[in-house]
Image (spheres, helix red, strand yellow):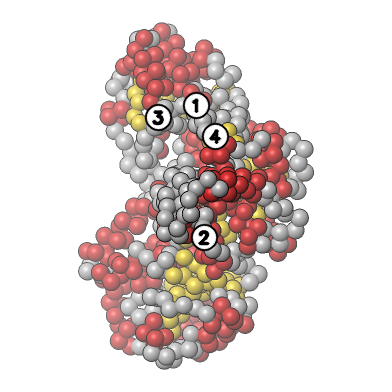
Amino acid sequence: MPKTSTQMDHQFDSLLDSKGYEKFSKLYKSFSTSFIKNILASVDFYVDLSPKEGFYILLARFFYPDLKVLANEPNASDAQSLSKNVANLGLENISIQLQRNELEETIVDLLSDYSSRQSALIRVMITGNEFEDIGWISEFSEKFEKVKLIIELDPKLIDSKLVNLQRPLEEIVKMGYEIWALDDQSNQFFRISSQNAIKSIPPLNSYIFYGVKKSQALSMCFFSHSPLLGGSEKMMFELVNALVKDFGVVCTAVLPRVGPQSEALAKIGVATLFAFPSISAYGWWCDDANTVRSKEAQQFQVFDCAMAVEMNVLENLRKLDPDVIWTQSMVMPWGAKVAENLNKPHIWYVTEFGELDFGFKFFSPFVDVIEEIQGTSNHVYTCSQVLRQTLFPAAEKEKVSVLYTCIPPPSVNALASTEQYFQKKDSVKIGMFSQIRTTKGQEDAVLAVSECVKNGLNVELLIVGEAPDPTYLTYLISLAEDLGVKDHIIFTGYSKNPFDLMALCDIVVMASRLEAFGRVGVEAMLLNKPVVFANTGGISEYQLDGQTGFSYPPGDSLALAGQLKLLINDPALRNKMGIAGKLHASNLFSKKNFSERVYFDAKEIANEGRGDCKNPTIIETLIQGAVESLNSQKKHQKFVGRNEVCPCNSGKKYKYCCGIIS
């Protein structure tokens, strides 16, 4: 079984530690290294000019053993150290030359064997006398269509004025490259492709720059509604990972606060900003089904979030200067607002029904929210056809289209012990993988298993997922006891890697009342599992009833039991459907249909600009309502000092909140 990226990371880090490479181990954990490692995944050649002791050479060879790696180290002592490190870490097939002409001859030989369409990453470490490398990059760029650059300058030489920072960067810009600085201190990108930007580069701990030909360059900023890694967040993670890895896109994510999503993004070289680190709200313009509060409270939430976005996000995004801004999920409007502020085009990816599936209560009429999503976007994607037809039935395809995600094959790190979860010998194992909510239909599965047991079938049900509402979990446990199937049903709670458990199952059930997409069904198919699914929402679009699984009417537990019996009694059918499901899912949910399409669409949208994209009005109205309430309160309050707590109940000082001077 191939190693996962997490296992590879751990193995490389352990190897560095075991060999005493403390300096390399620290460098490996940096933001810039994560980005470069991801970029290396999509190139055919890696050329390192002046690699010194060769950290990036070692990184490239370890993670991508089939990558052509060429090194030119003119310093004999450093070349000897590099060769020693290569041998010490047990790596092979690295071409190391002392003379530039030797490197050029090697590349010429390679070019005779490979098409010019091959891609390359060139890294140049400028330590004082390598300016001739800049011209050499131009020659190399002419030979390869896709060339990416990493330019690194020694900070000591910058500080001592021995190296002019502007000169090499200006030359690269003249060659037709876009350039971004990678700031390892703040873990951010900022664009420096204009002469003024180059002149205003601030002092950095490390001077690392990334260059891409302008015809291929793209920078995107993604707004996510949650710090977690639920279904919609995983879609965004997989998209940005593919955009970085396959197209070299500079990606920045704006998240509510630190969490599992920011940790995952950091490992793939995606910069993160946190919009609401000190307030409890996630920045939504809606409440969940169980929250009840006044209109004024809703207005103040939007007001507080608008202030937080301005304070925590806007200035960094001005430095980044993204080409396109993307909003993930309909529940948060700040991507559209920032796109207006920066005069950038905006894309909205809608991944839920909103009112119908989650019962969200929006701060404005839902029909106005849908109209605002369309009006403030250059393009709207939906994650399924049924979602598009339900929310945007009259929209033109040029404005609103379906974008199926690409879900990578689930990583099964270590096969869990069957006996740890399932107690009955030779039982047919059924799994459900989702949060435990009434809308997810776990009750149907419990009732269906009870029916199967009544018919003498040896079956067990594994329910994996957290329970936001503990009362529903308590009800399910009581129901299982009352039906006499308590020992046939296992509740595991939240699982960090549910695929280990899914791999143990024979059948996967999806019983949701309404699901905009239903990624669990795709994950099950990719693991060769037949799926029994409620015939509703997005899942009914991609499942092939009778071929990859069986459907049943949502909420009909007897029909669910009947479909389960067909699979429980026929192991050969389970295997046949599992094989068909994997093939179908692999073809339908491809990179070509997902990240590749987004890249070319975003490039086109970036070139066109905002066009007829409207400015958001709903949040402006809500903010105005909060301001009017504040003004009304001030008439009946004593004077508020700038260092006193703001009367809007934000908890901030007045000078940092309603009394801010812009």
Please name the residue that numbered disc 3 is placed on: 467
- The residues tagged by marks 2 and 3 sit, at their Cα atoms, a distance apart of 41 Å
Residue at 31% x, 25% y: name it.
Answer: 422
Question: At which x and y percent is residue 155?
Answer: 39, 81
Q: Is residue 235 above or below residue 657?
A: above
| Disc 2: CA contacts within 10 A as few (<14), some (14-19) or many (>=20) | few
Q: Local crowd at mark 4 within 10 Å, few (<14), some, or many (≥20)?
A: few
Closer to the chain start, of discs 1 and 2, is 1
Q: Decide: marks 4, 1 in contact (CB < 8 A)?
A: no
**Residue located 52% across and 85% down the image:** 166
Label 4: which residue? 294
Q: State which tag comes first along the sequence, 4 or 1.
A: 4
Mark seen at residue 660? 2
Q: Are marks 1 and 3 in contact (CB under 8 Å)?
A: no
Q: Earlier in the sequence, mark 4 or mark 2?
A: 4
Task: Say which amino acid is labelled 3.
Answer: Ala
Amino acid under label 4? Ser
Please report the residue visible at 31 percent of the width from the left and 56 percent of the height from the top.
Answer: 10
- Graded by Cα atoms within 10 Å as few (under 14), some (14 to 19) or many (20 or more), the crowding at tag 3 reads some
Mark 2 and mark 3 lie on one chain; the one further toward the N terminus is 3
